[in-house]
C-alpha cells in the first residue's frame, strides 16, 4: 500500500542553523501538509499546500518557515534559523482530493528535530 | 481558534475490556477523524466520519459523528494488547487543516 515517507527520521541541529525536512507524499496526491507535535502534546497544523502555493498556514508558520515542492515527488519544509522551541516531531501528510469520502489525510512517520 | 477536548486523558484497562472515549468542540466540524499514534510514529487513520449522525465501524472499532457536529466518540470492543497507544480525534471544517484533540492514552494492564 502506498505511504508517505519522510527523511531524515531524526535531525539534530544547533540553534540558528537552517534545516530542511523532506517528504515524499503518496504519488497521486495533490494536497500536502506539514504538522508538528511537541513532545507529549497534540499534533498542530503548520501549513497546507496545493497547486504549488500555500493555501493555509497557522500562526506557528512564521517567516522562519517555508515550504517547497521542488519536483514532482518531494515536498520540503525549511526552517531558516532554528530555535530551541522548534524541537518537535514534524509530520508530513497528503491527500488525493478535497471533499467527499476520499478526503482523508495520510501521515508520514515523522522527523524528530532536536535543536541544541 | 477551534479547540477539541478529548476525554479521558488516559485509561488503564484490562485486556478484553471495552473502551470508550470522546471528543467535544466549541465549534462545528464537517468531518471527524480518529487516529492512533504509536510511540515515535505518525498518526494512523482508524475511522473517518463525514456526515452528522453517521455511525461507522472498522473491525472492533466504532465511531459516531455527533448530531450537533460538535462531538464524536470512539469505542473499542474487547481490547487486545496491540490497542495500546494514543488515540487522537481530529476535526475539519472546510477542506484544509485538521484540528487535533488532546489525545487519550490507552494502557492495558496485564
Image (cartoon, coloured by chain):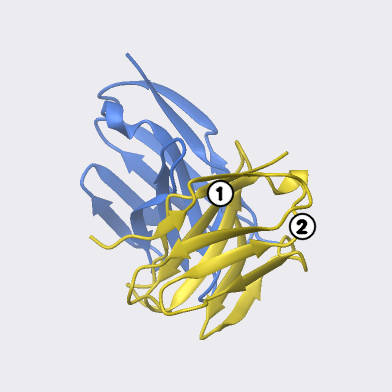
Q: Is residue A58 above or below residue A84?
A: below
Q: Quadrant of the C terminus of chain B?
A: top left
Instruction: Pinpoint residue A79: horizontal percent, then vertical percent.
Output: 69, 60
Q: Quadrant of the N terminus of chain B?
A: bottom right
Chain B, chosen colour in render: blue
Instruction: Pinpoint residue A90: horizontal percent, then vertical percent.
Output: 56, 52
Q: Is residue A92 above or below residue B37?
A: below
Name the residue tied to disc 1. B101
Asked if labels 1 and 2 share a chain, the reply is no
SS label for mark 2: loop
Dot 1 alpha-carbon crowd within 10 angstroms: few under 14, some 14 to 19, many 20 or more = many
Labelled disc at residue B30: none
Q: Position of B7 compared to B12: left or right?
A: right
Residue drawn where x is 76% and y is 66% of the image? A62
SS label for mark 1: loop
Q: A84 or B109, which is in the foreground?
A: A84
Q: B11 or B97, which is in the foreground?
A: B97
The answer to whether the residues at label 1 and label 2 have Cβ atoms under 8 Å apart is: no
Q: Position of B3 compared to B67: left or right?
A: right
Q: Which chain is yellow?
A: A
Residue drawn where x is 36% and y is 77% of the image? A100
What subunit carries mark 1? B
Name the residue tied to disc 2. A81
Tell us which disc is closer to us: 1 or 2: 2
Query: In which quarter of the view is residue B12 placed?
Result: top left
Residue drawn where x is 77% and y is 49% of the image? A83
Whether residue A9 is visible, yes or no, is: yes
What subunit carries mark 2? A
Amino acid at each position: 500500500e502506498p505511504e508517505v515517507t519522510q527523511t531524515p527520521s531524526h535531525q539534530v541541529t544547533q540553534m540558528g542553523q537552517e534545516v530542511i525536512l523532506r517528504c515524499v507524499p503518496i504519488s497521486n496526491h495533490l494536497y500536502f501538509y506539514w504538522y508538528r507535535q511537541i513532545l507529549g502534546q497534540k499534533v498542530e497544523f503548520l501549513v497546507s499546500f496545493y497547486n504549488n502555493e500555500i493555501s493555509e498556514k497557522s500562526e506557528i508558520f512564521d517567516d522562519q518557515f517555508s515550504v517547497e515542492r521542488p519536483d514532482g515527488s518531494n515536498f520540503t519544509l525549511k526552517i531558516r534559523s532554528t530555535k530551541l522551541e522548534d524541537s518537535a516531531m514534524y509530520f508530513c501528510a497528503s491527500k488525493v482530493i478535497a471533499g467527499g469520502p476520499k478526503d482523508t489525510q495520510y501521515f508520514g512517520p515523522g522527523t524528530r528535530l532536536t535543536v541544541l | 481558534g477551534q479547540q477539541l477536548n478529548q476525554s479521558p486523558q488516559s485509561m488503564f484497562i484490562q485486556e478484553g475490556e471495552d473502551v470508550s472515549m470522546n471528543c467535544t468542540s466549541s465549534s462545528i466540524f464537517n468531518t471527524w477523524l480518529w487516529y492512533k499514534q504509536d510511540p515515535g510514529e505518525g498518526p494512523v487513520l482508524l475511522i473517518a466520519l463525514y456526515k452528522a449522525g453517521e455511525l461507522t465501524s472498522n473491525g472492533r472499532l466504532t465511531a459516531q459523528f455527533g448530531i450537533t457536529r460538535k462531538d464524536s466518540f470512539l469505542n473499542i470492543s474487547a481490547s487486545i494488547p496491540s490497542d495500546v497507544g494514543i488515540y487522537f480525534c481530529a476535526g475539519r471544517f472546510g477542506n484544509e487543516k485538521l484540528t487535533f484533540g488532546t489525545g487519550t492514552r490507552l494502557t492495558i494492564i496485564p
